[in-house]
Every structure is written in C-alpha cells, then in structure tokens.
Image (cartoon, grey):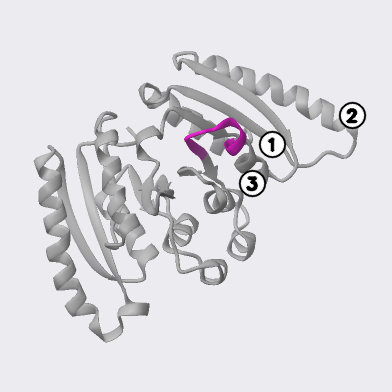
Amino acid sequence: MLFKKVLVSIDFSDASKLLLCCLDEFKKFGLKEIVLAHIVDVSSAGGSATSFMESNKNKLDEIGEELKKNGFEVKTIVKTGFSATEIEKTAFEEKVSLILIGSHGGGFIKSFFLGSTAFDLLRITNNPVLIEKFKRKDKVLKSYCPVKFLKVLVATDFSDCSDNLIKTIKENKEIFNEILLVHVIEKAKSLEDLENAKNEAGKKLNKIKDSLKDITTVKTLILQGAASKNIVDASNESGSSLIMLTRKGNNRIKEILIGSTAEEVARHSKVPVIVLPC
C-alpha cells in the first residue's frame, strides 16, 4: 500500500508544518505509521549542529505526541548531515512506503544551481516521493491536501517503469476518483510517423484504460512535443489535483545537469506530484 508507512520530512518551516495536514487524508487510505524526520543540515548549521539536534528533537517529539492522539504510530528521528542523503537513508532504514516532502527553496538562483532538498532527493531515492505544493490565498500559505486525489493526471511512456506506475495505481485503486492518462510523443521523423505513433499510443492507452475499469472515470490524452512542458500544461488545463509519473534515471549526467522529465514536472507543476522510481 502506498500510504501504509510514510516518512514526513520536517524542517519546521510553515510549509513543512502544513504537510501534517495531509495525514488525516492519508489515514483514509490506510496510513498507520508515520516517521517524522528532521535533518540538521551541516552546510548551514556548522559547529552548532549538536545543539540544534537536541532542541529540534524536543519540538519533533511534541508534534509526534499530537499525531499519536489521532491514532497514528509515530517515530521521530533527528539526524545531522546533508538533508536529501539523510532522508533517503532514513527511508531505507525504516522501510517506508512513501516520502512526503514540501517544495520550497531559497529562490530561483539557489534552486537552479543547487536544487532544493526535494529535488536533490528525487535524484537519489529509491522510494516513491510525494512533493506537496503550496499556494497563497489572502496572504495565507495553504496546501492542496484536501483535494489531492479527486482528479489525477498519470503520465505514461509505456515503459516498464510506467507499467510499475499503473500497477501501483491498481493496488491503490480505492483512493482514485478520476484519472487522466497522458502520453507525450516527443519525436517523429515525419507526419506519417507522427500519425502512426498517435495510433499506436491510442491503442496502448485504451488497453491501460480497460485495465483500470474499477476506477470511476478514466480518460486518455495524446500530446506531442517536450514531455515535461506538455504534462504541466495538461495538468493546468484539465484542472488536475495531482500528477503521477516515474523517474527512469537512464541518463544520470543529463539529469544532474538539466533535470529529468520527472524533476522538471515536479519543479514547475502547480499541484502536488508523486514520483515513483523505476
């Protein structure tokens, strides 16, 4: 189950505190165990890391006690190191089914050159990651939690990785209301090749649609061009509440330099994104 045991990355920012609002929704989908993880980043804490760890462990324990009142099993963990690396190590050690993290950073330049913790994590983790997005309404920061699974855009390239994504959806079918299956054709040598690719994609999408017949509404969409841009645009135009896709990791150098499709979608999407490893 996707939500059986979730690691929640907490840095005590307003955005990370809002992640806790998602947990009641996940409880409906089988969430029982929560690992609250806080990483004291050595790149910013320096020699004060030890003192930060003690005070932050107390704050994290207080959050854990509140969650226990709602019926969750909670474990709190504070470590020091590089945030993304330690989150991944903790997720592996605790055998979590999902990592929940918020997307916010120190501005465009920092995010572009260094990557925020969320995007660094995407590049190294072998766990499913849910990147929560936030919006400001009347100057108040809010998350998308309450409507996350109403209308989900699922991006597929028909690879084995995408087959694993569809399998995950089938295993968690009770949480989905409406799904939009999207395939993007990135390359075609001619108009004839493009039409052939569209026809082939249509057949494959319909086959996937038939396999998801237990879900109330499943629609399909074929697009052409840059995958990440088309996926984000389709999400905006369709009013999706969540995007799901996989990270292949076939070209690590390219991903490090310019980002994978999954990372680019996660970076530019206005709604939350779930990325599954291949």
- Name the N-terminal-most of marks 1 and 2: 1
Looking at the picture, which amino acid does disc 3 mark? Ser
195 or 140, which is in the foreground?
140
Residue at left offset 72%, top offset 33%: 223
Residue 126: percent from the left, percent from the top? 42, 50
Of mark 2 and mark 3, the one earlier in the sequence is 2
Q: Identify the residue at horizontal 50%, vertical 58% (top origin).
A: 123
- Residue 208 picture quarter: top right
User: Residues in magenta?
Assistant: 235-244
Quadrant of residue 256 in the image?
bottom right
Mark 3–mark 1 distance (CA, rounded to whole Å): 9 Å
- What residue appears at the point 82 percent right and 26 percent down from the top-left corner? 196
Q: Where's residue 239, x and y in %?
A: 54, 32
Apparent side of residue 81 relative to residue 201 in the rendered image (left or right): left
Residue 241 is inside the magenta segment: yes
**Residue farthest to the front?**
138
Callout 1 environment at 10 Å: few (<14), some (14 to 19), or many (20+)?
A: many
Where is mark 2, residue-wise?
Answer: 192
Amino acid, disc 1: Val
Q: What's the residue type where badge 2 is placed? A: Glu
| In magenta segment, residue 44 | no
Q: Which residue is mark 3?
A: 228
Secondary structure category for the residue under label 2: helix
| C-alpha span from label 2 to label 3 | 24 Å
**Which residue has dot 1 on it?**
184
On screen, residue 180 versus residue 275, left or right, reads: right
